[in-house]
Image (spheres, helix red, strand yellow):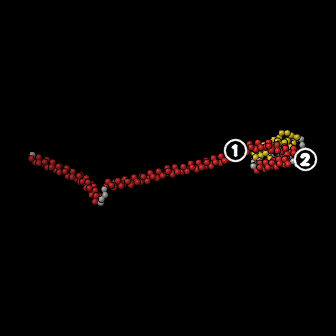
């Protein structure tokens, strides 16, 4: 009995020793890792560096790279905005140039309309001058009258100034009838070569530059 009890006690002691040895072997790697970390910290402290600072530096480097990428992204919208503004400026300049040309053209048209209206008012006065001179030319005594000479000089001066301003009479006698320049008020029989042509001018027509101020009143041959 004593022997059996002794054997049991020996087994227990052996099991306890095995467990203690297993714990010691399992704890050795963890202890080694802790030793390595402690050694690293001591080495960094001796070099005057802080492991936390190194981590910060790595993070700052990553942050700088992100900031540079963000700056590049920001530059692209700015360049696009500059191009957009330049395009708007060029368009506004083109619109202003078109507006200037359009206003100049409108001014010229308004000036021509005003000039034509004034010329239309002057033409009856010219007609009266021509009638008076024609009547004076038929009378030999009135031809030698100084007053009539003065009227003829005034008439010539007036026609010269109108011609300088761009007012010219429309040629009608002997010309083919043209409705753009002539206004046929009557027809008469004439020679064969006078058919469709102006054989009489009842009232002179006038042009201002390239536009008709007043059509010529004519008689057309049949």
Mark found first going from the N terminus, 1 or 2: 1
Image vertical order of residue 45 relative to residue 154, above or below: below
Give the residue at mark 2. 140
Find numbered disc 2 in the image and state the secondary structure of the residue it sits on. Answer: helix
At horizontal 46% and vertical 53% (from top left) the residue drawn is: 72
| Residue on which disc 1 sits | 110
Q: Residues under labels 1 and 2: Cα distance?
A: 47 Å
User: Which of label 1 and label 2 is nearer to you?
Assistant: 2
Pick whichever, 118 or 4, lies toward us: 118
Give the percent coordinates (x, y) of residue 121. 76, 42
Q: Can I make out residue 144 in this image?
A: yes
Q: Callout 1: 10 Å neighbours few (<14), some, many (20+)?
A: few
In front: 165, or 69? 165
Q: Residue furthest left?
A: 2
On the image, the x and y values in percent for residue 82 come to: 52, 51
Circle 1 SS class: helix
Which quadrant, please, contains the N terminus? top left
Specify the quadrant of the image occupied by residue 199: top right
Q: Is residue 179 in view from this perspective?
A: no
| Residue found at the far bottom of this picture | 47
Numbered badge on residue 130:
none
Left or right, 43 with respect to 203, comes to left
Quadrant of the image containing the C terminus = top right
Q: Residue at x 61, y 48 (%)?
A: 96
Classify residue 189 as left or right of residue 99.
Answer: right
Q: Residues within 10 Å of mark 2 (few under 14, many from 20)?
A: few
């Amino acid at each position: 009995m004593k022997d059996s009890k002794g054997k049991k006690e020996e087994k227990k002691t052996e099991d306890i020793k095995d467990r203690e040895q297993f714990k010691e072997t399992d704890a050795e790697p963890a202890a080694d890792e802790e030793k390595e970390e402690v050694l690293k910290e001591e080495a960094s402290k001796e070099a005057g560096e802080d492991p936390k600072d190194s981590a910060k530096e790595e993070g700052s480097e990553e942050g700088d790279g992100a900031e540079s990428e963000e700056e590049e992204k920001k530059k692209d919208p700015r360049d696009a905005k500059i191009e957009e503004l330049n395009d708007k400026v060029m368009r506004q300049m083109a619109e202003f140039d078109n507006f200037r040309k359009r206003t100049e053209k409108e001014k010229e048209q308004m000036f021509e309309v005003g000039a034509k209206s004034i010329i239309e008012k002057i033409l009856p006065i010219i007609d009266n001058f021509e009638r008076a001179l024609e009547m004076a030319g038929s009378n030999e005594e009135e031809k030698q009258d100084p007053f009539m000479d003065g009227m003829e000089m005034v008439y010539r001066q007036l026609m010269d100034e109108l011609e300088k301003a761009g007012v010219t009479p429309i040629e009608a006698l002997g010309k083919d009838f043209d409705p753009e320049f002539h206004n046929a008020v009557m027809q008469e029989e004439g020679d064969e070569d006078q058919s469709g042509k102006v054989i009489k001018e009842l009232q002179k027509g006038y042009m201002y530059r390239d536009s008709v101020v007043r059509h010529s009143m004519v008689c057309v041959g049949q």
